[in-house]
Amino acid sequence: MSVVGWETSDRREHLPADWPKRRTRQLRLDGYRCTERLEDGARCEREAEEVDHVNGRYDEDTLTSLCSWHHGKKTAKEGQAAQRKNMAAQNRKFRRGESHPGTLRR
């Protein structure tokens, strides 16, 4: 599976015009620290380099500051979920109503 990098993506085109201002504001609000919670409930200690959004929305209540590691982990998880959803849709589209002749028992 190939990963599309930020440099080759069209994602920048979908950002609001004031994204740099929103991004800086969110990083300041979060103290330039990752907001992800670890398994023990403690907050990640890493510096936040990235600001994540939810469902294509860039409202203040959908933004969160993340370190690169947690952002990559979240993005990969979302990508895998989308891939599973697409595969399930394809499988439903091409599902046969009858068994393949090679699998019939005599």
Image: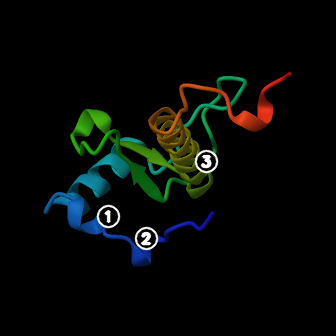
In the rendered image, the vertical position of residue 23 relative to residue 38, given as above or below: below
**Secondary structure category for the residue under label 2:** helix
The amino acid on which the numbered mark 2 sits, given as a three-letter code, is Trp
Neighbourhood count class around disc 1 (C-alpha, 10 Å): few under 14, some 14–19, many 20 upward: few
Q: Which sits in the foreground, 90 or 20? A: 90
Residue 2, horizontal then vertical, whole percent: 59, 68
Horizontal side, residue 86 vs residue 21: left or right: right
Left or right, residue 39 beside residue 68:
right
Residue at 52% from the left image edge and 49% from the top image edge: 75
- The amino acid at mark 3 is Lys
List x then y, in percent, for residue 39: 71, 27
The residue where tag 3 is placed is 73
Indicate which disc residue 6 carries: 2
3D distance between C-alphas at marks 1 and 3: 18 Å
Q: Quadrant of residue 11?
A: bottom left
Label 2 to label 3, Cα distance in Å? 15 Å
Q: Are marks 1 and 2 in contact (CB under 8 Å)?
A: yes
Residue 11 bears which disc, if any?
1
Which numbered disc flags the more N-terminal residue, 2 or 3? 2
Task: Decide: is 19 above or below 45.
Answer: below
Identify which residue is drawn at 49% across, 32% down.
92
| Residue at 78 percent of width and 37 percent of height | 102
First-in-chain label (1 vs 2): 2
Contact, mark 2 vs mark 3 (Cβ under 8 Å) = no
As drawn, 103 above or below 33:
above
**Which element type, helix, strand or loop, lies under badge 1?**
helix
Q: Tell me which residue sits at (24%, 42%) in the image.
A: 57
